[in-house]
Image: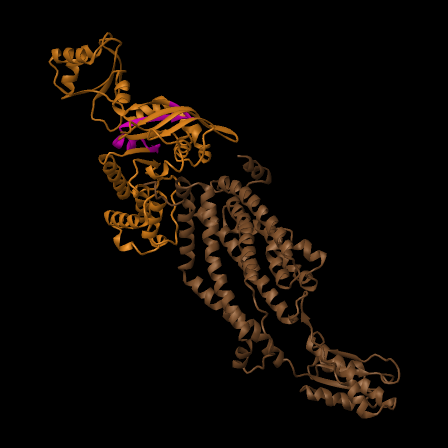
């Protein structure tokens, strides 16, 4: 039984004029949906390319499914959706899928069957004998997902899978990911779109400037961020709020007040003072008799955690080195 | 799953082969090739016939040669007219300009008695056939007149002036030489087919590499297979398609040349009854070996070129140096044909850039010993391995580079990766 789908240990990759990945280590447990998150140019694609043996690391080690180094032996067990999408424009759709499966070690006969099944699954059966170039962009994207999973790989790697997807195909992709996960596969993907990542990730690894910022199960990462103690409050009316005011003004309980985030229905957010537990605040508020409609320990979104840990400045710096990664 | 897994290059070669062979174009070009070959044989003969007529005026200062010359030219179907001796050159040149005559022949008064030069001026003087006929007829008529003037017995003179029968046979020591013309035609045809095939398919490899880059499908491919397997698979797949086409063409060429007379007959042209020298199996082996190695050699170069550039337009420019390498043997073809056993031919057929195109020709003309061919093949094989390795390194790095065209220094650095 495989325990780790991918183990990256101290990996470094230098290009001519900069270091793309610096002493990076993380472990992707088998069977999870693992997101490598970071701003553009952080080294996400470079890392995934090294796992796919497209480029070789200058230092460190990569193990795949506990036993393979990146390369030909690992290839049948990996499915890959590159960031730069492309298919052979003049190939028939079914031949394209069959060919990709074959290259990943599936026999021709089996590959043809699977190609047919996938085309049916994605609603492309009537296009089977058409050339790839006759398909719309959205349909080509579906074919590309299929090419990444047609050989039933244990590890599915998706590089920026949402870039350029229309909402319908984004949904198709989420379904495919969910199916793959349900079938016990491991999904390793990269993205800079935190909203998408938050919806499907079990694990995250945030990197910036080629180095790891933090990693772990999404739940743990979020819990760690909660400790900072932010509570969203709402009262039934102004009178209720006035009644609660003495507690809100208590400096031993509340360090600061701030307005609610845009779009949020809370009246205000409060930052708890050091040593003040949320339940203590709740007790005090209840004791005032004020009618409270909402009391919520704020769990920051992944996006908030990301901006806080990586910094807006880092995301900006990254933009111009994007091409190299 | 990995037990019976086929090598990546084979999977890739199969795709490349099928993608080419399954197109209408492949069928069309394979089928139309021979029609082109038939055209190459028939059209010149037809054109030559159309061109045969000529209108020539004769200015005869000897008062003796005009009539016999006109008679001989008449036999060729030319229209001749003897004009007044006083007709000056500008008038005659004017007639050429206005198209009323093709040219005029000026026979000086001492053409028979002395060594005066007979001059022909005409718009068709570049026509080889016209030049040859002009020379032959003048020679014959003037010599006849000189014989008569010297008082030689007309019957003896007739015998003396009968054209000598000459026939050249091509041999390098064998007892039964074949017709020199036929040996040359075969050697030339083989050389031309090899040149066409190598340039056609090697360039096809380059274009296919560029297409993979521009369509970005290369990203998908490099994740599934090693770049080396990609390059080899592509070269082998395209080459296999080429081999099928050449085999078809060769077969049709042999049929065409063998039945040349009959084919010309269909167009109402008399054949010249020449026969193709027999092609021994060793000849076939030599041709195929040189095609394979030559193709690999150039295909690897073109694959590397394809990997260096990002668009078809850039590829057009970048391929010039390699195309020039291929042009050198084409332009040196005559050197080998004229003296297949000479030093220049020897050198050209040992250099790997030119040997794949020129050696089969030299071999067919009998200019090369078995040892020569073995050494040349050895050099070509080693160079091909070397070039393929280098190209593989450039390819490996180049296929993932888009945008800016790399400098020579960058490419040299890729070789060390």
Where is residue B145? Give x, y as percent: 83, 88
- Residue at image coords 77%, 86%: B58
Where is residue B14? Give x, y as percent: 40, 52
Where is residue A71? Give x, y as percent: 40, 36
- Residue at image coords 80%, 85%: B160
Residue placed most toward the observer, B375 or B155: B375
Q: Is residue A277 left or right of residue B152?
A: left
**Does any portion of residue A4 appear in the rendered image?**
yes
- What colour do you see for chain A? orange
- Residue at image coords 88%, 82%: B114
Q: Which chain is brown?
A: B
- The image quadrant that residue B129 belongs to is bottom right
Q: Is residue A46 left or right of residue B103?
A: left
- In the rendered image, the residue lying farthest to the bottom is B154
Q: Which quarter of the image is occupied by the C terminus of chain A?
A: top left
Height in image: B132 above or below B171? below
Residue placed most toward the observer, A244 or B192: B192
Residue placed most toward the observer, A81 or A224: A81
Q: Which residues are magenta?
A: A189-212
Where is residue B32? Give x, y as percent: 48, 68
């Amino acid at each position: 039984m495989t325990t780790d789908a991918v183990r990256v240990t101290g990996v470094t990759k230098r290009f001519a004029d900069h270091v793309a990945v610096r002493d990076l280590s993380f472990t992707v447990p088998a069977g999870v949906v693992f997101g490598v998150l970071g701003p553009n140019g952080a080294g996400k694609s470079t890392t995934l390319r090294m796992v796919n043996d497209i480029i070789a690391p200058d230092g460190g080690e990569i193990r795949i499914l506990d036993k393979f180094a990146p390369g030909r032996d690992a290839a049948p067990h990996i499915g890959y959706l590159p960031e730069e999408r492309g298919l052979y424009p003049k190939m028939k759709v079914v031949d394209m899928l069959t060919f990709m499966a074959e290259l990943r070690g599936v026999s021709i006969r089996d590959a043809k069957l699977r190609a047919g099944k996938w085309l049916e699954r994605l609603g492309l059966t009537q296009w089977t004998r058409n050339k790839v170039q006759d398909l719309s962009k959205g349909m080509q994207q579906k074919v590309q997902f299929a090419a990444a999973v047609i050989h039933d790989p244990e590890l599915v790697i998706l590089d920026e899978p949402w870039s350029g997807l229309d909402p319908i195909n984004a949904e198709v992709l989420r379904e495919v990911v969910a199916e793959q996960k349900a079938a016990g596969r491991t999904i390793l993907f990269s993205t800079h779109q935190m909203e998408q990542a938050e919806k499907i990730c079990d694990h995250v690894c945030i990197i910036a400037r080629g180095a790891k910022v933090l990693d772990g199960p999404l739940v743990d990462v979020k819990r760690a961020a909660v400790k900072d103690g932010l509570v969203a409050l709402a009262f039934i009316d102004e009178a209720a709020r006035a009644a609660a005011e003495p507690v809100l003004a208590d400096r031993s309980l509340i360090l600061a007040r701030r307005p609610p985030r845009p779009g949020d229905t809370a009246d205000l957010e409060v930052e708890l003072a050091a040593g003040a537990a949320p339940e203590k605040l709740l007790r005090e508020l209840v004791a005032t008799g004020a009618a409270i409609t909402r009391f919520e320990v704020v769990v920051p979104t992944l996006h908030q955690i990301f901006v806080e840990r990586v910094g807006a400045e880092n995301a900006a710096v990254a933009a111009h080195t994007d091409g190299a990664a | 799953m990995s037990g019976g897994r086929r090598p990546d290059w084979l999977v890739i070669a199969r795709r490349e082969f099928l993608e080419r062979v399954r197109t209408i174009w492949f069928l069309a070009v394979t089928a139309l090739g021979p029609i082109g070959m038939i055209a190459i044989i028939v059209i010149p003969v037809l054109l030559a016939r159309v061109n045969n007529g000529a209108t020539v005026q004769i200015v005869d200062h000897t008062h003796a040669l005009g009539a016999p010359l006109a008679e001989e030219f008449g036999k060729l179907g030319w229209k001749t007219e003897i004009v007044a001796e006083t007709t000056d050159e500008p008038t005659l040149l004017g007639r050429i300009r206005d198209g009323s005559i093709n040219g005029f022949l000026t026979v000086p008064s001492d053409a028979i008695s002395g060594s005066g030069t007979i001059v022909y001026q005409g718009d068709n003087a570049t026509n080889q056939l016209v030049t040859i006929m002009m020379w032959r007829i003048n020679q014959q008529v003037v010599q006849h007149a000189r014989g008569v003037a010297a008082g030689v017995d007309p019957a003896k003179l007739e015998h003396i002036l009968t054209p000598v029968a000459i026939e050249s046979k091509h041999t390098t020591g064998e007892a039964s030489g074949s017709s020199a013309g036929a040996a040359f035609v075969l050697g030339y045809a083989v050389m031309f087919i090899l040149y066409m095939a190598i340039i056609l398919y090697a360039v096809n490899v380059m274009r296919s590499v560029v297409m993979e880059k521009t369509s970005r499908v290369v990203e998908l491919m490099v994740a599934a297979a090693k770049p080396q397997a990609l390059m080899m698979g592509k070269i082998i797949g395209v080459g296999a398609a080429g081999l099928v086409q050449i085999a078809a063409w060769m077969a049709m060429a042999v049929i065409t040349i063998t039945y040349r007379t009959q084919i010309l007959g269909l167009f109402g042209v008399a054949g010249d009854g020449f026969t193709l020298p027999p092609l021994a199996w060793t000849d076939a082996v030599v041709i195929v070996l040189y095609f394979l190695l030559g193709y690999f050699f150039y295909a690897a170069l073109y694959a590397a070129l394809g990997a260096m550039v990002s668009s078809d337009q850039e590829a057009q420019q970048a391929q010039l140096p390699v195309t020039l390498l291929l042009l050198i043997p084409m332009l040196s073809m005559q050197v080998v044909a004229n003296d297949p056993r000479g030093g220049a031919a020897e050198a050209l057929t040992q250099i790997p850039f030119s040997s794949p195109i020129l050696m089969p020709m030299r071999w067919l003309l009998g200019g090369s010993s078995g040892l020569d061919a073995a050494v040349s093949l050895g050099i070509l094989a080693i160079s091909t391995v070397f070039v393929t390795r280098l190209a593989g390194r450039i390819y490996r790095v180049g296929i993932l580079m888009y945008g800016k065209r790399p400098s020579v220094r960058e490419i040299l650095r890729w070789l060390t990766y």
